[in-house]
Amino acid sequence: MEKLNRKEKLLKELQDLEETNTEGTEGTEEIDEPIQAVKGEVIETTKAVKEKKPRTAKQIEAFEKARQTREKNALERKQSRDEEAIAIRKQVEDKLVKKAIAVKKKQIKQQAVLDEISDDDTPIEEVEKIATRSVTRTKLKREVAKDFPAPPPPAQEPVTPKYYFL
């Protein structure tokens, strides 16, 4: 009920304002100027603004202390993340260097085999032996590395004697 009365009042005020604006602006030009509140004048609103309770000195000190510890902890976390990133980069770099060395050794071995083969006076049979020897060595190394001990034989079940009664 109270809301309806309020809405009706607001609608009437709005209509009155529209009528006064349209009547006064028909033949004249008005310059829009911003509306400024006079100093010390209090504008009433529908809701009462609740003022905040001021902080005590101890609360302010505790807040500053908490802010400082938060900044310190954030800095420590950042440093630890940076250290971990550096350690990971170093591990990756070490692995990369080891892999590069292994590739280079492999290239040197292949070049040595090619140098042995490239002699013009070497017969074809020896070239084939050298080529198969280098291939079989690498295959044997791989197979030896993959060999696992043979599984133990399955356990035999004990034989139970059978008795026949007549």
Image (cartoon, rainbow, N blue to C red):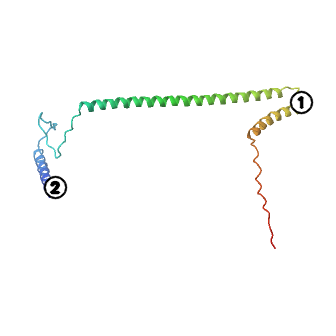
Q: Is residue 107 left or right of residue 21?
A: right
Residue 10 or residue 28, whichever sits in front: 10
Q: Earlier in the sequence, mark 1 or mark 2?
A: 2
Residue 123's mark? 1
Specify the quadrant that holds the N terminus. Answer: bottom left
Q: Return the x and y of residue 138 as percentages of the image width and height.
A: 77, 35
Q: Return the x and y of residue 15 as percentages of the image width and height.
A: 13, 52
When asked about the image quadrant of residue 136, the answer is top right
Residue type at numbered disc 2: Lys
Residue 3's mark? 2
Element carrying mark 2? helix
| Rendered view: 17 above or below 137 | below
Q: CA distance from mark 1 to mark 2?
A: 113 Å
Residue type at numbered disc 1: Pro
Residue depicted at x 10% and y 45%: 24
When asked about the image quadrant of residue 65, the answer is top left
Residue 123 or residue 97, whichever sits in front: 97
Q: Return the x and y of residue 62 as percentages of the image width and height.
A: 30, 31
Q: Return the x and y of residue 30 as percentages of the image width and height.
A: 13, 39
Q: Is residue 6 left or right of residue 140?
A: left
When asked about the image quadrant of residue 122, the answer is top right
Specify the quadrant that holds the C terminus. Answer: bottom right
